[in-house]
Image (cartoon, rainbow, N blue to C red):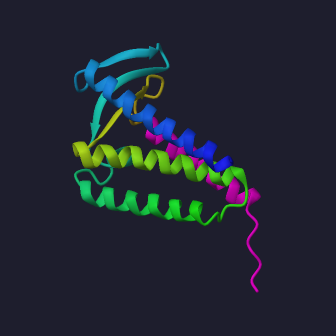
Amino acid sequence: MLYAIFTALALGLLGLDQWLKALVTARLALGESMPLLPGVVELMLVHNYGAAWSSFSGQRWLLVAVTGAIVLAVAVLLARRVMRHPLGDAAGFLILSGGVGNIVDRVRLGYVVDMFHLEFWPTYPVFNVADICIVCGAVLGAVYYLWLHEPRKKR
């Protein structure tokens, strides 16, 4: 039952990510911005040809392959039910949702559409819903692993 809920949430977040990217692309020109929460967050259309902080820029297929491998590994862990706590499962589904969202962009467009810009931290990179899912999933995964994970006993 919990997997069904997490699957629905992951699909909903993936849909939100793709919908918001399409909306921002339709309403803003590249580099243009508009306030979302004035003084906190603005929407700014950016095409990211790399990974975090534009690292590996221009390495489209390498990034697709690496992200795909991570998504596949997380999917296998979830399918095998390796995590024995809902927090670990939630982390995995968040990482899947975000990874797939960015893979869809890279394969379809050749870049990732980013749109959230923190006005109070102007040097921080522009990001999207998929990035939020990946970061939240990674943080939850670390919490799970550090405090809730119980290794299986060897026979």
Residue at x 72%, y 60% (from the top left corner): 84
Residue 152 on image: x %, y % = 74, 74
Instruction: Please give the range of residues in magenta.
Output: 128-155
Residue 94 on image: x %, y % = 54, 46
Q: How many marks?
A: 0
Residue at x 38%, y 22% (from the top left corner): 43
- Residue 32 occupies which quadrant of the picture? top left
Give the side of residue 127 with respect to residue 111, left or right.
right
Does 69 appear in magenta?
Answer: no
Q: Residue furthest bottom?
A: 155
Residue 68 on image: x %, y % = 38, 59
Is residue 148 visible from the viewing direction of this image? yes
Look at the image and tell me in which quarter the C terminus lies.
bottom right
Does 151 appear in magenta?
Answer: yes
User: What secondary structure is the magenta-colored segment mainly?
Assistant: helix
- Residue 33 occupies which quadrant of the picture? top left
Residue at x 57%, y 53% (from the top left corner): 92
Residue 118 on image: x %, y % = 45, 26
Residue at x 38%, y 29% (from the top left corner): 19
Q: Is 42 above or below relative to 54? A: above
Give the side of residue 144 with respect to residue 114, left or right.
right
Give the side of residue 135 with respect to residue 17, left or right.
right
Q: Is 154 above or below relative to 152? A: below
Is residue 115 visible from the viewing direction of this image? no
Which of 119 and 103 lies nearest the eye of the viewer? 103
Which of 31 and 17 lies nearest the eye of the viewer? 17
